[in-house]
Image: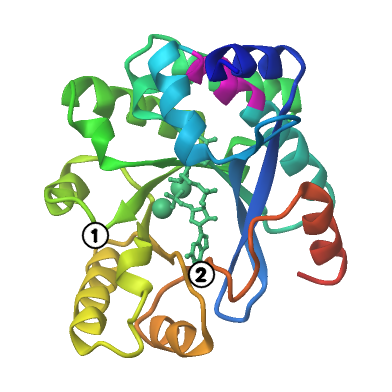
Amino acid sequence: LNIEAAMRLALEQDGFEVYYQPKVDGQRRIVGVEALARWFHPELGPVGPDRFIPIAEETGLIQPLTVAILRRAFAAARCWNQDRVEPLRVAVNLSPLLFIGQDLVQRLGDLLDEAQLAANCVEVEITETVFLGDKDRAVKVLEELRTLGVQLAMDDFGTGYSSLSYLRHFPLDVVKIDRSLVTDVESEEEVAMIAGAAISLGKRLRKRVVAEGVENQAQFDFLCEQGCDEFQGFLFSRPVPAAAIDRMLEAGG
Ligand code: G
Ligand code: G
Ligand code: NA
Ligand code: MN
């Protein structure tokens, strides 16, 4: 079975799913969700994004795949935001390749219009590989996205070697502390020092700081103490279908 052909067929049949992982505040109230692509193939079984995103990037399918995911995520976000005062933000992951194309900002704006969704309900997660290519172009696109009104998050913060200079030069609203700095934060003193420094750096630069990969209460307590604003991880919820988020919000977040 050719995986590229299977992906093309799945795209034609709207066969990709989107799961959502809650982000909570220090009181464990849901303040946002991260949209994560899922593919359940009738013969191949579940295929993870770690496998199909790189293939989509190699085959030119990343653009139609991202449009399909954003369309679903924005429609869901519109429902969740119907009777809310504070916006529930939906975060989407954008491949660095999409920043090379000409029409990312236009397309994102069109998708927001189509869903009748306010831009401040959307957060775009990027990794620092966005900046490895044409930096000026990346900055220009990020600034245009910000003008559109979406928030910009640096994903996997703490894993790359140049993250600190990126914080200075690129317009970012949020940093997401990488899971590798959260794992063992409660038991390894050095991990705790590095994570603590990353969090306080983000705070001093006036970014919203989100910790990902939070798996136990001791990690949550430590990250709260250090001043993290939001938390994501299996302690609160795994990524789940939209209907499960509906129920969590009905139950009061
Ligand atoms: O959901 P999971 O933890 O298996 O995700 C694995 C990786 O795939 C993560 O790095 C995540 O950011 C990425 N990923 C998930 N969904 C998307 C998507 O819609 N677009 C892109 N570009 N990456 C995604
Ligand atoms: O690269 P990105 O940050 O987008 O990765 C998101 C991935 O992390 C998803 O595949 C999700 O399933 C996974 N994930 C989310 N929360 C946790 C967690 O608490 N522990 C672990 N091990 N993985 C997590
Ligand atoms: Na992400
Ligand atoms: Mn991440």
SS state under label 1? loop
Residue 86 in percent (x, y) is at 68, 58
Count every numbered label the image shows and give the total. 2
Decide which of 24, 235 is in the foreground and name it: 235
Q: Nearer the viewer, residue 103 or 36?
A: 36
Disc 2 target residue: 231
Q: Position of residue 68 (x, y in %)?
A: 65, 23
In magenta, the rendered stretch is 61-68
Q: Is residue 64 magenta?
A: yes
In terms of depth relative to the viewer, which is nearer, 141 or 232?
A: 232
For this view, does 26 lie left or right of residue 172? right
- Please report whichever mark, 1 or 2, sits nearer to the chain's N-terminal start: 1
Q: Which residue is mark 1?
A: 158
Q: Amino acid at mark 1?
A: Gly
Rendering coords of residue 54 (x, y %): 41, 28
Please name the residue shown 63% across and 30% down the image: 69
In the image, residue 137 sits, relative to residue 252, either above or below, namely above
Residue 189 vs 170, above or below: the answer is below
Q: Is residue 229 above or below residue 244?
A: below
The residue at the point 52 percent across, 38 percent down is 49
Q: In this rendering, is residue 54 above or below 188? A: above
| Relative side of 130 to 91, left or right | left
Asked whether the viewer can see residue 117, the reply is no
58, 149: nearer the viewer: 58
Q: CA distance from mark 1 to mark 2?
A: 16 Å
Q: Classify 10 Å Cα crowding around label 2: few (below 14), some (14-19), many (20 and above).
A: many
